[in-house]
Amino acid sequence: MSSNASMHGLWQSRWLFILAATGSAVGLGNIWKFPYITGENGGGAFVLVYLLCISIIGIPVMIAEVSLGRMGRQSPINTMKALAQKAGASPLWSSIGWMGAIAGFLILSFYSVIAGWALSYTLDMASGNFVNISAENSGKIFGDLLANPTQLTIWHTAFMILTLGVVARGVNAGLEKAIKVLMPVLFILLFILFGYALSSSGFGQGFSFMFDFDFSKLTTESIMVALGHAFFTLSLGLGAIMAYGAYMPADTSIAKTIIIVAFLDTAVAIMAGLAIFPIVFANGLEPSAGPGLLFQTLPIAFGQMSGGVIFGTMFFVLVSFAAWSSAISLAEPIVAWFVEKFKMSRTLAAVIIGFSAWLLGLATVFSFNIWSDVKMFDKTVFDLLDFLTTNIMLPLGGLLIAIFVGWKMSETKMMNEVGIDYPILFKLWRFTLRFLAPIAIIAVLVNGLI
Ligand code: TRP
């Protein structure tokens, strides 16, 4: 059993951990990214592969990552260092923490820009700009936003300040209290939108787009994207969930708790898809529209429903909050490490990291306008950052975590830690970490890269 203290504090209860972890997991990945990559990768078959990745690889690795955190009770970098030492393994294992901290930093830089879109849309919605809007004009509003670096930078700045402002204070009762209200409201709003989509003429088409498995549309790159996204959406592979695990009460069953978090996360993604695709088809839009999908489609639906201004505003407020509670967990591992390593205040650590991530974020801002022609491997700066972190660094982090827990940690120790009640399930979990997950991840990475 792990010790009962961390210098950064502990969640007050199991439920607050669930809330915080769900807050981290449910974010832009679910509401913005999942629908658009599903659209780009042809729908059904992609969704199936994604669900398989979540259940076969994502959940077992997530359980492993959280247990490492709780056993170490420090920032991921120091946790990995300490655990490797205790297990008599090479100090190189702390690279899991290092790579994660870097990936978290890179993701934060572009995450903040996209979250800025949601902030900007909150204002647009509230001012009634979308009432009875046509699909064409909705596309134009989005295009105008992307073409304007100043606008993008303002919102990106605002979001970064919000995020690091919370991290500076510690993940305290303020945020915990906020998500307690906001997550349920987000669910309710998704249900309302889902109800609207259900009644729209495109529902059947949207539904079959998501659940008809046409394997001819599946490429090796889309399998890689599905695996990467399974990691991204569960906040896995970079130490974020490890850091949250470090603040988890000692007597909680990690396995049971993580299954709840993964279930909620998947449910939100599926509902977001089911809310968006019917609107796409009912309005003759393209499912493969890319990153703009959410922002071009949902406003049309809000523009047509009664009370749409209010619901629409609430919706984008909630997307912003979902992004906010996720972004915090991207910054937490590095901030916690700065505090431990340099004995500096959280505030100073947050300012340094926030400013640097903000600066790098400008590259993403420009990739949508003045640098939109700057491409490497046929990808813009934003696409490249996203691909490198999500599709390569996160699976690599997950691979190392699986191998470390599967091969380097003692079986009895893990048995005491993870809280899997049935020996056979425990064996299955351990087998997955030792063989199944590493082989699957390596196969996908190797195939995707060559
Ligand atoms: N899971 C979040 C989302 O779906 C993003 C995120 C937060 C994340 N923390 C993370 C992704 C850590 C990878 C690793 O939007």
Image (cartoon, rainbow, N blue to C red):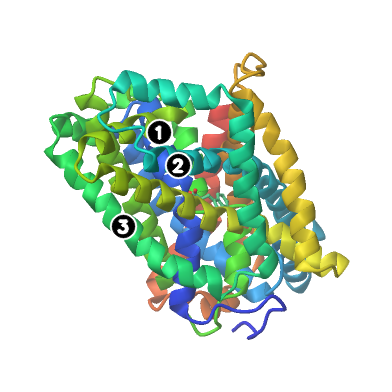
Residue 354, percent from left and from top: 72, 51
Within-10-Å neighbours for mark 3: few <14, some 14–19, many 20+: some
Badge number at residue 187: 3
Choose between 413 and 118: the one closer to the eye.
118
Judge depth for marks 2 and 1 and give the one in front.
2
Looking at the image, which residue is at 68% across and 37% down?
361
Relative vertical location of residue 85 with respect to residue 396 in this rendering, above or below: below
The response on whether ligand 1 sits within 8 Å of label 1 is no
Judge depth for marks 1 and 3 and give the one in front.
1
Badge number at residue 15: none
Residue extending furthest top? 373
What secondary structure is marked by label 1?
A: helix
Residue on which disc 2 sits? 123
Looking at the image, which residue is at 17% across and 29% down?
202
Residue 243, percent from left and from top: 63, 65
What secondary structure is marked by label 2?
A: helix
Residue on which disc 1 sits? 295
What secondary structure is marked by label 3?
A: helix
Choose between 144 and 62: the one closer to the eye.
144
Q: Label 2, label 3: how many angstroms apart (C-alpha)?
A: 21 Å
Q: Amino acid at mark 2?
A: Leu
Residue 299, percent from left and from top: 33, 34
Within-10-Å neighbours for mark 2: few <14, some 14–19, many 20+: some
Looking at the image, which residue is at 72% across and 47% down?
102
Choose between 137 and 181: the one closer to the eye.
137
Q: Amino acid at mark 3?
A: Phe
Within-10-Å neighbours for mark 1: few <14, some 14–19, many 20+: some
Q: Amino acid at mark 1?
A: Phe
Choose between 205 and 135: the one closer to the eye.
135
